[in-house]
Image (spheres, coloured by chain):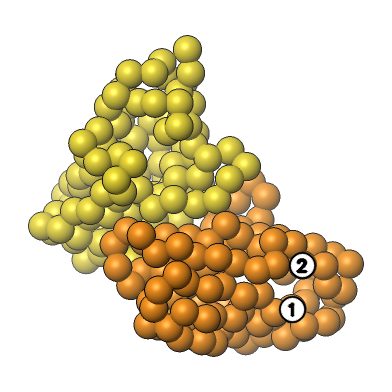
Amino acid sequence: QVQLVESGGGLVQPGGSLRLSCAASGFTFSDYYMSWIRQAPGKGLEWVSYISSGAGFIYYADSVKGRFTISRDNAKNSLFLQMNNLRAEDTAVYYCARGGSTGDWWGQGTLVTVSS
Amino acid sequence: EVVMTQSPATLSVSPGERATLSCRASQSVSSNLAWYQQKPGQAPRLLIYGASTRATGIPARFSGSGSGTEFTLTISSLQSEDFAVYYCQQYNNWLYTFGQGTKLEIK
């Protein structure tokens, strides 16, 4: 059974940092591209970033480029998103998803709130 | 950036009836189009990829069609569990983009 469990969300002040984690199980993590997708409260979906299976290919949305860093640890079946210089508009539920073009499995999401 | 436009914003349909949802891309995305279903408080679920291929475990009442810039998701006979928000997503070119969603509600 595929499982993706995000953690690390919370309340942070503008300009602050957070590191999100996604623990994967039930599949061979190292075989798959992985992605972060976010959804602002009551809004639609935004694809934030994805990383190839070996971390050789990484893409970011323009809205987060230079502030967010995606990474993975295949030995620990884990995906990460380091978020720096956070802004109010980064407030959203952040989902970890399996896949680099479509997300065929999603975690339950972790809420990031950027507010003073 | 490819802009995805979904119509209608809200669709009211009775259980047992057919629902047809539309998605238009601002430029051709070939068949690199996916559909997702999202229920309140839940993560999206992949329904269709490649414009017309059902994802694992998706019932046959869900079907997708189209290519280029015009796409359709059809639900042939609505069940109570199908009332949700549906999103289309293009993955032809990075930056991948989603439509704004169609809310399918009970009539």
Secondary element at image label 1: strand
State the residue in front, A69 or A32: A69
The chain displayed orange equals B
Q: Earlier in the sequence, mark 1 or mark 2?
A: 2
State the residue in front, A57 or A104: A57
Disc 1 chain ID = B
Q: How many marks?
A: 2
Q: Which mark is residue B64?
A: none
List x then y, in percent, for residue B96: 36, 61
For chain A, what colour was chosen?
yellow
Quadrant position of residue A56 = bottom left
User: Residue at label 2?
Assistant: B11
- Which quadrant would the N terminus of chain A be assigned to in this image? bottom left
Secondary element at image label 2: strand
List x then y, in percent, for residue B32: 38, 77
Disc 2 chain ID = B
State the residue in front, A82 or A61: A61
- Contact between marks 1 and 2 (CB within 8 A): the answer is yes
Give the residue at x 39% y 53%: A47
Q: Which mark is residue B19?
A: 1
**Does the image show residue A27?**
no
**Is B25 drawn above or below residue B50 in the view shown?**
above
Residue type highlighted by circle 1: Ala
State the residue in front, B26 or A100: B26
